[in-house]
Every structure is written in C-alpha cells, then in structure tokens.
Image: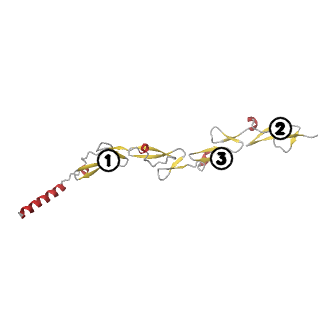
Amino acid sequence: MHLLMMLHACIFLLCAITALAVDNDECAQGVDLCDKTTTTCRNLVEGYNCDCRPGFRKEGDRYKCQNVNECTEGVDLCSKITATCRDSFGSYSCECKSGYRESPDKFTCNDIDECRENFGGCGQLCLNFASGFRCVCYSGYKLKNDEKNCEDIDECVEGVDLCDKGSTTCRNLAGGYSCDCKSGYEKGGDRYKCNVVKQ
C-alpha cells in the first residue's frame, strides 16, 4: 500500500511537471491574435493577453485597442496658453502657437523675442509682447503699408501742424516740421506763431 501511494505521488508529480512543461507560448510563437500596432502580447499559463500599448485602451475587442485622444479628453500635458494639442495614433504632440517656440520639455512653448532676432525686421523701433511683436516709429514718422518700415509724416500737407496760418508758413522736416515766419513777421517766444515786425 505504501508503494502504491508512492507510485501515485510520482505519477501526480510527473503530471504536474508535464503540465508545466507543455505551456504553449502563443506570444513567442507568433500565433497570437493580438493587433501588433495597438497591443503587446503577454503570455499566461493558460493562453495569453493582449495588453494595450501606451496611448491606447480596451473598448470591447480583446485583441485590439483603440486610440486615446488625449487632446479631446483633456489628459494631455500641453500648455493651454502657449500650445495646441494635436492627437496622433497612439500619442499626441504640442504645437506652439504663433509667436512661440517649443521648449525642451516639449509640452510648453516660450515666447519668441522677435525684437532680439534681427530687430523683428523693423526699420526704427520694435516692441515685443507675448505671442508677437509690433514695429513702431519715432515721433514724426508713421509705418508704411509693409508695417515694418517708417516714413516721414508731412505734417504740413496732412494739416496736423500747429503753425499759425496768419503769421507762419509750415515747412516739413525729417521727423517734424518748422513754422517759418512770413514776410513782415519775426520770431517771438512762441515757436508756432510769429509777431509783426515793429517799424
């Protein structure tokens, strides 16, 4: 009877060892049904599992995973102020808004100081601000249609001068104007008006 129990134990152990040795690794053999682009095959003692790759999740199909749209679900790490989230298959990227440049962390963007880079292409003055810049001109000048270069304002022609029309004549200068005394008048204390010459 003792011999019979030992034989039974050996047969049980042999069966257990045989059962362990016969595990069919479907993943290693490549016979699994896992979708290779969205899942990774993980071997189990009895069968296998299709685990979702990062950026994917299970939605009903045990062999395939669906793309997670991190942008519409709000789980992206993109800066809402400086970048726009762009979904891609299994991932996403942060696209910098106009006037910003990608930072090393790839999620935020830094302001581009256009004024430090080639003075923004401006002819006279450059004003940098978040997400952009603007060219401005010195007093007496205005921006041309290209919004980069400046041209002199002819205050006399445009009628924006302060010269007294009775005693002076407006003369345009680069970046300004002068009120020249008419014949019979002379300069006094007012730069825009002349006084009658005393005889």
Mark 1 sits on what residue? 39
Amino acid at the residue labelled 2: Thr
The residue depicted at 28 percent of the width and 51 percent of the height is 42
- State the mark number for residue 125: 3
Determine whether, in the image, residue 38 is placed left or right of residue 142.
left
Determine whether, in the image, residue 50 is placed left or right of residue 16.
right
Label 3 or label 2, whichever comes before in sequence order: 3
Residue 25 at x, y percent in the picture? 23, 51
Q: CA distance from mark 1 to mark 3?
A: 56 Å
Q: Look at discs 1 and 3 and give the one toward the viewer.
A: 1
- State the mark number for residue 2: none
Please, what secondary structure does the residue beneath circle 2 have? Answer: strand
Between 101 and 1, the one lying in front of the other is: 1
Amino acid at the residue labelled 3: Leu
Please, what secondary structure does the residue beneath circle 1 have? Answer: strand
Q: Are marks 2 and 1 in contact (CB under 8 Å)?
A: no
Mark 2 sits on what residue? 168
